[in-house]
Image (spheres, rainbow, N blue to C red):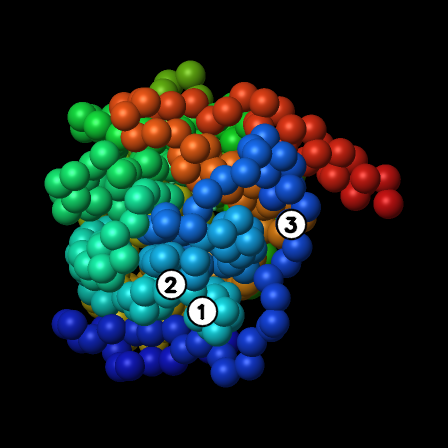
Amino acid sequence: MNHLSSLGSSSPGRRIRAIPPRRVRPAPPHLPLLGAARASFGSIALADTCLLACQHILSSTHSLLRALVADGLERRNIAVIGKCYSTSAAAYAEMRADGLRVCPSSLELDPRRSFDEQFRASVDAFTRAALAAFEQRRPRRILVLDDGGELIAAVCEQVSDRSRLAAVEQTTSGWQKLRQRELDFPVVNVARSSAKLVHESPLIAESVAEQVEQVLARVAPGARRVLVLGAGAVGDAVRLRLAGAHAVKRFDLDPARSDFDAARLAEALAQAEVVIGCTGGCSLPRELHSRLRPGCVLISASSSDREFDAPALRAAAPVTHLHEDLCVDGVHLVNLGFPINFQGERDPIAPAKIQLTRALLYGGVLQAAATPSAAARGFVDLDGALQARVVRDFTRTLADERAA
Ligand SMILES: NC(=O)c1ccc[n+]([C@@H]2O[C@H](COP(=O)([O-])OP(=O)(O)OC[C@H]3O[C@@H](n4cnc5c(N)ncnc54)[C@H](O)[C@@H]3O)[C@@H](O)[C@H]2O)c1
């Protein structure tokens, strides 16, 4: 909640903005696993390459970009856009002080509108401006590093000569979105790499579950009845973590993972003191809000603000900063409906752990740079040897930490 200020309440068109600090740390964290990813490649020529990136603006992302600079990518050839709900204002300031171009929209939100709608427009404008600046230098390759598929889609719309393109996609939702398209350039599929699926999910689940416990202790200390919507990797980990001290029920569209069927959802909502959305989509549309019991706490674990009708709730109350908890008609919306584990810190998951993801992404970018655009169309698997090396070192690091 530091470094945040109000530009007014949530009247139409009024934006709230995180304020970057003036004092910055000189260097982002050292991530040894980046070296493990680098070892899969010989010399890489990045001198006449540009990078457009959509990434969470965190210190460990800064470390990843620094590694690419060390490989020869010029700072002026890097343009980054982040998502306001995950942006660390400190990391933003540090990246900019380091000469990296980070789009200012990464700090801003109009609380009355959905994040996805605003982000799509920001990505479109960011892509247009970055490509115009890059084209003056006639780059040999244009690399795209994406989180969610929106940036790759914008680049597809705006670049007619795609023979210089190669991309990397980080998330399953981005992979699902882009699968519908005819991609005529390579996209390295970090999203569905077994290294990410197996080893990253527990880190996310742990971080979400820890935050949920803290928020419940603060916002609803006496609450016992918890309803988890979506019992996938994240939802199930949250359920297990809370099960000792709370009476937890889960609802999933998959009956095998649900404690009751859809016909009884309204009844379960009326009883729940806390609802935790972990579906990745809209689990509680506006028409179901009237079913919530007074004082109910809504927590999202998913990306963006999709789980509940957050824009409608935000429009009904003055909003002053990006990580605020609101109370509207007796219902509490935590963190403006954004994922609970993003609260503006430099890295919500410790760099020693989240370096796994950064190393896979770094390796993905190097693999994209080394893949001629004509050599592959559409998704290509992240290199198996790279994954094995990163996972081996990651497992050792965790074992050493536990032993220490
Ligand atoms: N907070 C973070 O740091 C972070 C990081 C990565 C991903 N995520 C988000 O977490 C979400 C969940 O991740 P996951 O790995 O558990 O996904 P998952 O696909 O394993 O699980 C989602 C579950 O939700 C169920 N579901 C879908 N729509 C539903 C609905 N309307 N009602 C009830 N159940 C429904 C599905 O059947 C599935 O079991 C992702 O979609 C992503 O947005 C968050």
Tell me if the residue at label 1 has its CB under 8 Å from ligand 1.
Answer: no
- The residue carrying mark 1 is 99
SS of the residue at dot 3? Answer: loop
> Which mark is nearer the camera, 1 or 2?
2
Pointer 3 or 1: first along the chain: 3
- Using the image as rendered, state which of residue 244 and residue 238 is in the foreground: 238
Work out whether mark 3 precedes mark 2 in sequence or the reverse, and give the earlier one.
3
Ligand 1 sits in quadrant: top left
C-alpha distance separating marks 3 and 1:
20 Å
Query: Can you tell which quarter of the image residue 387 is in?
Result: top right
Does 144 sit above or below residue 163? below
Front disc: 3 or 2: 2
Q: Mark 3 or mark 1: which is in front?
A: 1
Identify the mark at residue 76; answer none if there is no mark. Answer: 2
The residue positioned 52% from the left and 31% from the top of the image is 196
**Horizontal and vertical percent for residue 157?**
14, 42
Circle 1/circle 2 CB separation < 8 Å: yes
- SS at circle 2: helix
What's the amino acid at mark 2? Arg
**The one of 337 and 148 positioned closer to us in this rendering:** 148
Which residue is under mark 3?
31
Q: CA distance from mark 3 to mark 2?
A: 23 Å
Q: Of 113 and 45, which appears nearest the observer? A: 45
Q: Amino acid at mark 1?
A: Gly
